Amino acid sequence: MKNWLMIFNFIALGCLAVMLSTFYIQLETAATEYDTDRLSKAIEYSGDMAFNYSLASVNDELTYQDMNQVTLSPNMCLPAFEEMMCLNYDMAIYTDNLKYIEDSIATALLATNDGYYITLMSEVNETGEAHSNTFEFNWSPKLPYTIKTYDDSNKPASEIAVCLGSEKWIRVNTNTLAVTNGVSYADIGSIKTSPDEGSVKSPSMSLNSETVSRAINTRITNAITQNIDAIADLRSDKDYSLYIPSEQTSSGLNKISSPSLILVMKDVDFSGQAKVRNAQISGLKVVKKVRVIGYLNDAGQRKYCYESQITDSNKVNLSAHAYFNSVEEATLAGFMPDFNFIFNKIDTAYKTR
């Protein structure tokens, strides 16, 4: 009888050990998920504040209707991000903590209409020594989006600077340094963007919105990954891989098609058990402000719908009366929804003139 009792006790202890192990694993999983979600939100809120500061510093009077006037300034971007991260984790805002947050940033990039800024590591010499081995982030000068072209001899012929959301371009001849510019890709003609590979001839091509978008996103991706590698060498960090597609993919990644902020975090120890690789990128971009248009229809009735819902063929029969920021404002002004157009697709594409 005693032997059976001992056997039952061992079985009970085994079950208790399994239950405790399961409870501990579930507790660890819940803590990891909580810390990861908290870090993700902290990066999101801090990135949002940094992006707003980069916009507010130069766009105080901008109504976001002429998208060509949207500009970004990097001056207050990183300080705003660092201060908000400190607030999210109940850390006092002072120099050591701000530097601590800065050291957790792998790289940051601000993409504007005609170029981009990227964070670079520069040596801080506070002691007067030749090499202080102390580094801090500084923003680069604005770097253009360029496409290199080659002549029939496979020598560099020119570099073409392009823009986001428009077909404006500037071309610099490599040999003569002559500068030409235009507002349409059709004016450039056929170009060769890569040299021949042995006996394989590189095909010529004409620029269009798709090829330019691909070139810009490839350049931004390469700039970020190369910068992360360079910074990782100085900090002895881990390697990263990053991909920015030229079109939206099934994973939800979006191309860079308007002024944007990309910020990549590295492993940090202030975020508890968070899986940093699940929440390491903050990305925000400027989008077109879609207004509500109030107008008179053929019968003289006051109607409204959103911009881009009216087709070009119908615009000639309508008389725009006012613009509103919301349908509520349009309704208060005496306008009613136009059910001929209100269900049409709203175009929020980023376009400049």
Image (cartoon, rainbow, N blue to C red):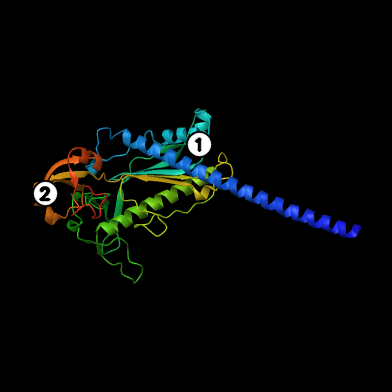
**Rendered location of residue 317, percent (x, y):** 9, 52
Amino acid type, mark 1? Ile
Q: In the depicted view, which residue is nearer to us: 59 or 221?
A: 59
Compared to residue 81, the image places residue 306 above or below, namely: below
Q: In the depicted view, which residue is nearer to us: 103 or 155?
A: 103
Q: Residues within 10 Å of mark 1 (few under 14, many from 20)?
A: many
Residue under numbered circle 2: 297
- Is residue 335 shown left or right of residue 164? left
Q: In the depicted view, which residue is nearer to us: 123 or 25?
A: 25
Separation (CA) of disc 2 from disc 1: 57 Å
Compared to residue 236, the image places residue 2 above or below, namely: below
**Rendered location of residue 117, percent (x, y):** 36, 42
The secondary element bearing badge 2 is classed as: loop
Quadrant containing the N terminus in the rendered view: bottom right
Amino acid type, mark 2? Asn
**What residue appears at the point 32 percent right and 37 percent down from the top-left corner?**
55
Please say whether residue 4 is visible from this viewpoint.
yes
- Is residue 300 shown left or right of residue 325? left
Q: Which mark is residue 234?
A: none
**Rendered location of residue 12, percent (x, y):** 79, 55
Residue under numbered circle 1: 101
**What residue appears at the point 25 percent right and 45 percent down from the top-left corner?**
290
Q: Earlier in the sequence, mark 2 or mark 1?
A: 1
The secondary element bearing badge 1 is classed as: helix
Labels 2 & 1 near each other (Cβ < 8 A): no
Give the image quarter of residue 334: top left
